[in-house]
Image (cartoon, rainbow, N blue to C red):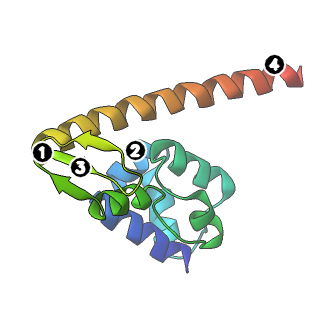
């Protein structure tokens, strides 16, 4: 798949404009424009920035078109294949979890996503610092 199409799919999936997507990833909108115009491709460095901003994106998909595009689709599918029993869900692995309303679930999920992304950003920063110290 062409890199321009990958960027289009990501923008569509996350329902974002190129400017907002680029800002969240930490690069200029012109990079997105150049990829969409097929002047540039997705480099390893750019793929890393995208994955840091959106950990659910499969880096191998960005670089090599290896499916799936989004890594946590399996979690969604496993819940869809579960048995719902009076506000509880029984998964294929026989675990039982409480179900909250869709709106509340979305709110909780977004909160966890924000926390996880911030933790990933901090981890990546620490790795960068350690790598710089090892080079000295």
Crowdedness near tag 2: few (<14), some (14–19) or many (≥20) residues, C-alpha within 10 Å:
few
Residue at mark 1 to residue at mark 4: CA–CA distance: 52 Å
Which mark lies nearer to you, 2 or 4? 4
Q: Nearer the viewer, residue 38 or 126?
A: 126
In this rendering, position of residue 30 left or right of residue 48: left
Residue 133 is labelled as: 4
Q: Which residue is mark 2?
A: 23
Vertical side of 127 occupied by 24: above or below: below
Q: Are marks 4 and 3 in contact (CB under 8 Å)?
A: no
Residue at mark 4 to residue at mark 3: CA–CA distance: 48 Å
Q: Are marks 2 and 1 in contact (CB under 8 Å)?
A: no
Tell me the element at label 4. helix
Q: Are marks 1 and 4 in contact (CB under 8 Å)?
A: no
Q: Which residue is mark 1?
A: 87
Q: Are marks 2 and 4 in contact (CB under 8 Å)?
A: no
Image location of residue 70, percent across then percent down: 45, 61
In the displayed image of the protein, which residue is found farthest to the front? 94
In this rendering, position of residue 20 left or right of residue 28: left
């Amino acid at each position: 798949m062409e890199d321009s199409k990958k960027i289009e799919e990501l923008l569509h999936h996350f329902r974002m404009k190129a400017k907002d997507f680029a800002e969240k990833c930490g690069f200029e909108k012109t990079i997105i424009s150049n990829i969409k115009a097929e002047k540039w491709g997705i480099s390893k460095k750019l793929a890393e920035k995208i994955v840091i901003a959106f950990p659910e994106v499969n880096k191998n998909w960005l670089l090599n078109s290896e499916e799936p595009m989004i890594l946590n689709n399996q979690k969604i599918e496993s819940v869809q294949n579960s048995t719902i029993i009076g506000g509880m869900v029984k998964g294929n692995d026989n675990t039982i979890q409480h179900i909250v309303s869709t709106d509340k679930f979305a709110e909780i999920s977004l909160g966890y996503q924000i926390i996880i992304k911030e933790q990933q950003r901090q981890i990546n920063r620490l790795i960068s610092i350690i790598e710089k110290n090892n080079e000295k």
